[in-house]
Image: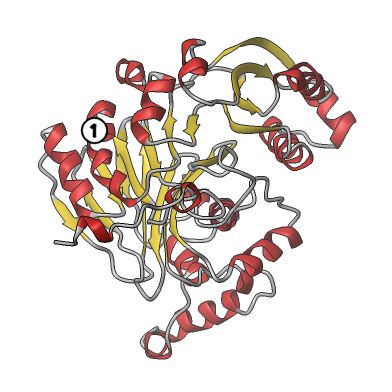
Amino acid sequence: MNDIKNYKPMDINTFSGGEEGLPKGACGLLAAAGEFSLNALLKSAMCLQYRGRTGAGVTLKGIYKDNSFYVFHIMYRDQYKVSELENVINSWGVHILESQDLVARKYYYEYDLPIIKRYYVTPPTIDEMMYRERIDNDYKYIMKHVSKFNKDFMHDARIFSSSKENGTFLTAFELTDTIKIYDLHKYEDEYYEACLIHLRWPTSSGRGLWWGPQPISVGEIAGVHNGHLSSDKSNAIALEQLGINLHVGTDSEAIFLQADYLLRKGYTIEEIEWVISRKFPQELASLSDSQRKRYLEITNDPILKRMKMSGPATAIVLVGDVLLGFTDRDHLRSFSLGYNDKVALLGSEQRAILSAAYFMEEELASVYDPDAGKVVAFKIEGKEIKKLDYGWKWDEA
């Protein structure tokens, strides 16, 4: 045992994690889809808290389901900016039906919080959207304006949830604090179909402690990521060429937006795997002639070739009704999967999967770590799940 006389106390800067005030560690990821208990999932995610103490978030799919309006969760750095930025949102031609505090007032005395509000928003008519932006789809219209808002006002506010179905809840604190601040246990009795949980501040600095925590969510896209992408600049350039804007600024966000783009463009699960995780020469040689031809066609495309996921990384992405999980081709970050005919569980550690199954009293038919670079995918239909094969693509949904 070290002699206490030799103990050297850390200064505040070092204790807080260094110059950025961020602790070292690794992100904890846990996701579920299908028939599951939210409280059991939140409880099982606690075993990942040791990975890092700063920043935690939860996305719940389906809690705002079956309505004709969008639900925005917005955080403001300055209470005096709220009215001004609400006017910016109104200038889109949308109508704010209702606004409310998303966090109980008492927590502003207990925690150092930004102003956090929830808005119920109806989009403009098709005629008005066509007149303003020549867009005839309200989802594309809202996505465009939310992304622009987050980019234009990154120093003042962030729309961190903007879906018709899903709700994302973030704090710069631990998961227990996130649960407490938003009273997430109350959603146990609400309708939900899937859940993404992320623990720890992201590796890249983003826009500040409250602007970086995951899940990163925009529209019907939400994602969680562990690791650091050496391909982050390449990924961002690919999206920029497609006119898709990053609105948070972390390396993770590009992967989530790429997954959305590839799915909606009708690429199969196998083709998405080829784009994200490039083949080693011996793997390429094992493909059939037709597969090899298609692989080379895709990976030599001037935009798609920039979408590779290089560096140590694991990600879980929710796009509409599809849940994707993948890891880097060198398997430098752990990734585990467990499922049966009722529930699918994906995580950064197998013990989180087994813990969730235990608390839910579910016997999983299969628990394993997917091979390096492999993509796994599930289709969510209400509270039913279906594991997707490599040939599945979005236009078959």
Residue name at image x 56 percent, y 52 percent: 20
Judging depth in this view, the residue of 151 and 129 nearest the camera is 151
In this view, 225 is above or below 182: below
State the residue at coordinates (71%, 33%): 137
Left or right: 390 as drawn, with respect to 262: left
Rendered view: 242 above or below 183: below
Q: Position of residue 289 (x, y in %)?
A: 45, 86
Q: Quadrant of the N terminus?
A: bottom left
What kind of element bears circle 1?
A: helix
Task: Give the quadrant of residue 321.
Answer: top left
Q: Is residue 58 above or below residue 181?
A: below
Residue 192 visible within the image:
no
| Residue 150 at x, y percent in the picture | 71, 38
Instruction: Give the image quarter of residue 53.
Output: top left
- Say how many tags the image has: 1
Q: Residue furthest right?
A: 131
Q: Report whether residue 353 is seen.
A: yes
Residue 295 on image: x %, y %? 51, 78
- Residue placed under numbered mark 1 in the picture: 43
State left or right for residue 118 relative to residue 366: right
Which amino acid type is marked by label 1? Lys
Q: Position of residue 262 (x, y in %)?
A: 57, 57
Looking at this view, is 276 or 213 the one in front?
Answer: 213
- For disc 1, the neighbor class at 10 Å (few under 14, some 14 to 19, many from 20) is some
| Residue 224 drawn above or below residue 356 | below
Answer with the quarter of the image where residue 254 lies: bottom right
Q: How is the image coloured?
A: secondary structure
> Is 346 left, or right, of 342 in this rendering?
right
